[in-house]
Amino acid sequence: MQTQLAPEFQGTAEGAKAEEILRRCVHCGFCTATCPTYQLLGDELDGPRGRIYLIKQVMEGAEPTRKTQLHLDRCLTCRNCESTCPSGVAYGQLLEIGRQVVDAKVPRPAAERTARWLLKEGLTSAAFAPAMKLGQALRPLVPASLRDKVPASANPRASDWPSRPRTRKVLILAGCVQPAMMPNINAATARVLDAAGIQTLLADRAGCCGAIKSHLNDHAGGLADMRRNIDAWWPHVQGGAVEAIVMNASGCGVTVKDYGRALAHDPLYADKAAHISALTRDLSEILPSVLPLLHAALQKRTEASRPRLAYHPPCTLQHGQQLRGGVEQIMRELGFDIALAPSESHLCCGSAGTYSVLQPELSKALRDRKLQALAPVPAEAIVSANIGCIQHLQSGTATPVRHWIEVLDEALHG
């Protein structure tokens, strides 16, 4: 696809990158067939191809409007289109440029600006944890629009963190919302890794991976979060004390694996960021090497429960990180009956970070569609690999929705 950049974008990094990405687009439309918002709305401009044309027009000098902004806002950034694209179009990077350019030209209404500011500052703030505890205590009084985002209570085992020193050590990112909403996910990860002879470390100053602010168009804030995490991890990484940085939230994983690209032009952080990205592994990439140890531990617990599971692979895992089949293979090899939805397992559940707050109608429609697709699996629980998906799906079903590592932890430790 040929592009003639407007003078204001010629010679800029954003313009050069957009031009490079657009050049790969061949207008085939394969992406449209796997776009969740196009499936719901049937509007070409609410699919990747249409959004690409909107961004192309803006980069060529057309003035964007609120309608342009709305079509870009409706994108989940699930990157299903990237998995489908035969030309390797980096749609996610193009969308990031497009949103940044459009937001600079099209002012948002005050209510939208306030909501987005509260999300990017509130979710990443130290005040989020006490606010979540207050919300849980007063859950029946919380407005229905927010109640879906408040888990009923924390697992009592969330504070049970193994303390035995191990030769093998990994870092784990606690994250911003996960420790407050579902702290047992991190604790369960540490217990399972401990059973496999691996010690899990936390770096005190590490926090949000940078995704929340970046996705809300605060790119400077997102990069600052990335640099803070690199500084927090570097003392552990520099001396080789840890063998990997493990992610149990696939949304964080896809972002940290991208630190090298995001900070490639920062002379102080480029090399460190590339090294951090190279060390980062999803939890499902770590466990295959220790499956014999976990299998032996399970064999000692003849009463270990192995509920039948329906599995929803998050978009950030299967499309963002291009990791497919790892969770199912691990759980099957450990004796679990786990199955994907018989249809549409590739489609987004509608959570997509802050999308479920900013686009509630589309988000809930996609949630209900996902639960309908999972319904044919006669499962005792639904499992996933990202906290956003877990809480979002739970808001629409009475079936327990959990992180898969919590289910494995319970089988190992009761």
Image (cartoon, helix red, strand yellow):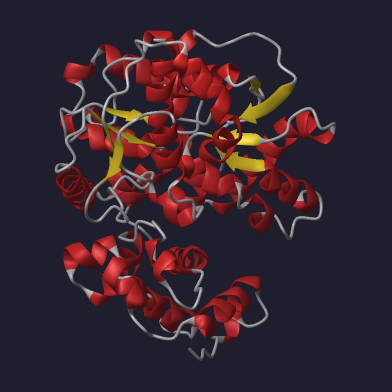
Residue 238 found in image quarter: top right
Of 149 and 108, nearer the camera is 149
Q: Left or right: 104 with respect to 169?
A: left
| Above or below 407: residue 84 | below
Image coordinates of residue 151 in percent, x first then y, are: 29, 23
Of 293 and 141, nearer the camera is 293
Residue 183 visible to the viewer: no
Image coordinates of residue 70 in percent, x first then y, are: 30, 64
Q: Residue furthest right?
A: 239
| Above or below 39: residue 78 | above
Image coordinates of residue 116 in percent, x first then y, are: 39, 46
Image coordinates of residue 145 in percent, x first then y, are: 20, 35
Of 317 and 193, nearer the camera is 193
Please give the name of the residue rendered at 68% of the width and 36% of the height, measured from the top-left corner: 244
Please give the name of the residue rendered at 44% of the width and 51% of the height, measured from the top-left corner: 324
Q: Left or right: 145 with respect to 241?
A: left
Please give the name of the residue rendered at 81% of the width and 32% of the height, measured from the top-left corner: 240
